[in-house]
Amino acid sequence: MDVDPRIRTALPSDAVAIKGCVEAAYQHYIARMGKPPGPMLNDYANVIQQHKAFVAEEDGDIVGLLVLIQTESCMLLDNVAVHPEYQGKGLGRRLLELAESETRNQGYTHLDLYTHECMTENIEMYKRIGYVERERRTEHGYSRVYMQKALP
């Protein structure tokens, strides 16, 4: 059954709760990667100030996050995270649909993202929903898979 948390623009006061949600969502990747995934290292007060950030909120708790970065050529889906207690219930899909809608509203024809190569389940999920792998490269010590989805 799908859950129905409210999705809204992130506020500066959400930064600590966002960090907690991201840490919960990405924690299981540390053993696989041998270090914390990049999103666990972000300063979310800064992210909220500089980029388009949205949160999913349920009963006052932040249970999901979406961060989009506008560039001249595209919108970058920088982070989508769902608290483990809410995974598999449709919230991630709602956040990805919002990313596509925001991207279209800004006049872009595609949405870009990258993920770590060891996050194989995410890579496969992105392929299932229309993303195409564009390249692989190592940046800042992370082996990244760059993907893109054309938006009609």
Image (spheres, rainbow, N blue to C red):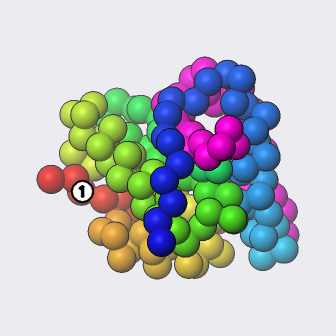
Relative to residue 31, is residue 105 depicted above or below?
A: above
Q: Residue at x 56, y 62 (%)?
A: 115
Residue 140 percent across, percent down from the top left? 71, 50
Relative to residue 119, is residue 15 depicted above or below?
A: above
* Front-most of residues 125 and 133: 125
Task: Give the residue type that dot 1 points to.
Answer: Ala
Q: Residue at x 36, y 76 (%)?
A: 128
Q: Which residue is mark 1?
A: 150
- For the record, the magenta segment spans 34-61
Quarter of image, res 62: top right
* Front-most of residues 65 and 50: 65
* Front-most of residues 11 and 108: 11
Q: Residue at x 41, y 32 (%)?
A: 70
131 relative position to 87: left or right: left
Number of callouts: 1
Residue 145 visible, this angle: no
Residue 2 percent across, percent down from the top left? 46, 65
Quarter of image, res 37: bottom right
**In the image, residue 10 lies in the stretch drawn in magenta:** no
**In the image, residue 56 lies in the stretch drawn in magenta:** yes
Q: Residue at x 35, y 58 (%)?
A: 148
Residue 107 percent across, percent down from the top left? 22, 34
Label 1 residue SS:
strand
* Residue furthest front in the image: 59
52 relative position to 84: left or right: left
